[in-house]
Amino acid sequence: MRTESPARQYIGFLGFSAFLLVPSFDTFLKYFGLIGVILYFAIGSLALLFVQKFVLPIYRSKMTGKFADILAVVTFAALTLAVTIVYPLANSERFGSGSDADDALLIAAGKLLNGEYPYYLSTYLGNMISPMPGAVLLSIPFVVLGIIAIQNVFWLGVLFVTVRHYFKSSPLALGLIWLLLLFSPTVLQNLLTGADYVSNSIYILVFMWMMVTTISDPKSAEWKRLLPAILLGIGLSSRSNFLLLMPLLLSILVQNAGWISAIKYLTVSGITCFLVTVPFWLYDPPGFTPLIVQSMKVTELQTVLPLAGVIIPLSGILLAAFLSLQKLETDCLTFFRNCAVVQLFALLFTSGIWSLKLGYLDLFVGQSGYGMFTLFFGAVAGWTAFYNNAVSSNFSFSSASGTRQAEA
């Protein structure tokens, strides 16, 4: 294992802390103000350092794969029970207004299943339906089964299985889930209120991971290459901010599979996204509320920064293009780290302009959950390097590649 300088270790540790803790800044700002945010980051970073120095070496040496699998079942059973109990209370408005993101999906998916246009009604908070068609389509199984609140728990389970599969380690995968639940309270908030930001982020990450690994493997069957490309196309129709990551995805595919394969399968994803999204817009352009909601936000930002709707995404794409020049291995860890950097940049840029408009600090444009778009990419990359370097107590994102280990 390569030894990193203390300065690089320190920068790497701060980077991991930022990816893990910053996505919950909005929650702490809402309830505890700026002092609460500062204390949360300070205490959270110290706690993370304690985990690195004292907890992880013991965890790695004692936790077996079989026991980790058992604890994972217990963890997800407890999460399912907690969501089942708390979700109805959160929607009752007895403890605040809750979130209407789940209601938007219920309305849109219900209308679509009935053969009706999904974007005409409003949520119980009076908001327009903002989820794009891909998010609506991917929520349909949970709407049909009447378990929309479990959608986030399901995708969190998919993340566990995916990390466990690709890194051949149940303890690593379980540690990631526990880390997210303990250090990122906004994850719990989204789980308990049914907001779909957790699901959006995880299925984009997982579909990208599947796409990179299958397309980079010359022995993989054609259907195994097409399936994740199609699924990613559907996922990209859930949130437009994920389109900022396309230069990075193109780069990692070109580096590991060549230009022809990269363009071929990204074209499949692009066509799928187009076919999923555009028909809903063509049916009734003035009634396509996801675009209306996004346009309203852009218009408000442009009162502070003219052409904000162009400058923000363009700057994010340029940053992604710059980061795509790095060597990106098929383990996807450097790739995920760079995806997190791009999402965090766009998030903080937008929040800064929004705060200037309001005259006070309002992180993540008044929405608890937008930080999830950064969290999961950064957490997978950071935690894997963090975990695999626990024995030497070193941490650096630059040592993220080539960390695949056999399960103890």
Image (cartoon, grey):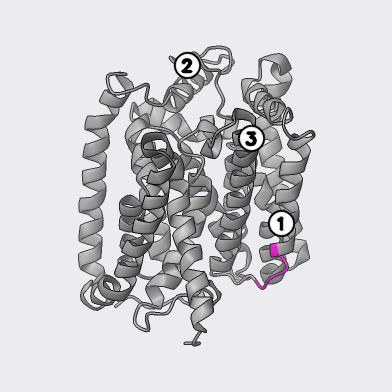
Q: Is residue 402 visible?
A: no
Q: Give the residue at mark 1.
A: 319
Query: What's the amino acid at mark 3?
Result: Leu
Q: Disc 3, disc 1: CB below 8 Å?
A: no
In primary-sequence order, the first of circles 1 and 2 is 2
Q: Give the residue at mark 2.
A: 123
Element assignment for label 3: helix
Image height of 13 relative to 81, above or below: below
Query: What's the amino acid at mark 2?
Result: Thr
Question: Is residue 406 a member of the stretch shown in magenta?
Answer: no
Q: Nearer the viewer, residue 377 or 184?
A: 184
Q: Disc 1, disc 2: CB below 8 Å?
A: no
* Drawn side of residue 290 relative to residue 172, left or right: right
Residue 79: which quarter of the image? Answer: top left
Mark 2 vs mark 3: give the one in front: 3
Question: Is residue 325 a member of the stretch shown in magenta?
Answer: yes
Distance in Å between CA atoms under marks 1 and 2:
36 Å
The residue range painted magenta reads: 323-327
Give coordinates of residue 284: x percent, y percent.
70, 15
Element assignment for label 1: helix
Image height of 45 relative to 139, above or below: below
Q: Give the residue at mark 3.
A: 356
Residue 293: which quarter of the image? Answer: top right
In primary-sequence order, the first of circles 3 and 1 is 1
Residue 256: which quarter of the image? Answer: bottom right
Dividing the image into 4 quarters, which one contains the C terminus? Answer: bottom left
Tell me the residue at 42%/50% (across/down). Answer: 38
Mark 1 vs mark 2: give the one in front: 1
